[in-house]
Amino acid sequence: MAASSASSWLMITSKQVIDIAGIVLEARYSYSTEFKFLAYTNIVAGCFSLLSLLFLVLVARQGSNPTHYFFLFLHDLALMSLIIGGCAASTAIGFLGKHGNDHTGWMQICDHFGRFCNTVTVSVILSYLSLICLLILTITSASKSRKMGTV
């Protein structure tokens, strides 16, 4: 939850305005659908992780039921899939922003918008940290679901 929340906060607040020869240029996360997708997926993942935690606390009071753990597994797997999509899209567009693509005519922008690119990079790294945490949760809930089904 913390990594997802921090990532979305960094992404949403990332912006930089520069002046090049009297022309004012601005970089914001909202100008890129990939960055918006990452920010929104992190918000969804953070909120649903909180709901999952509350559900887990309620399940622990009622005893262990393999069906509950299986639903937690599906929940964690769906969130992990959502986050991996946002990470992949943001990494691709971030790579273009940093290095450009001469074949298609896309110029690099990170040499002009360094602060913006650094903030977005940290946000994407936090999203990958969130992805790793969700992967661990998915493996754990799958293991508990499997163990509970054999008892």
Image (cartoon, rainbow, N blue to C red):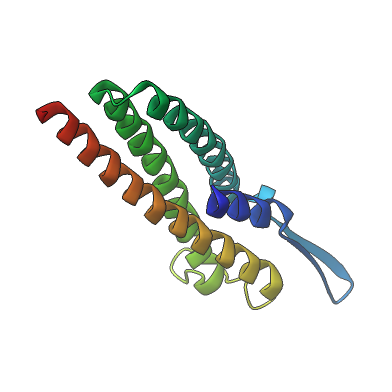
Left or right placement of residue 13 versus residue 138 in this view: right
Q: Is residue 134 above or below residue 77?
A: below
Instruction: From the top left corner, tell me how far across and down residue 12 is, in percent.
Output: 69, 51
Residue 105 visible in image = no
Q: Give the residue drawn at x 16%, y 34%.
A: 146
Q: Position of residue 133 (x, y in %)?
A: 40, 53
Question: Residue shown at 68%/67% (left/top)?
Answer: 116
Above or below, 102 against 89 in this view is below
Seen from the viewer's position, the closer of residues 122 and 95 is 122
Position above or below: 102 against 57: below
Q: Please state, as top left, top right, bottom left or bottom right, where the C terminus lies in the image.
A: top left
Q: Quadrant of residue 72?
A: top left
- Residue at the farthest right position: 22
The answer to whether residue 128 shows anywhere in this view is yes
Can you give x and y, in whole percent of width and height, for residue 3 in the image? Answer: 54, 55
Q: Is residue 136 above or below residue 79?
A: below
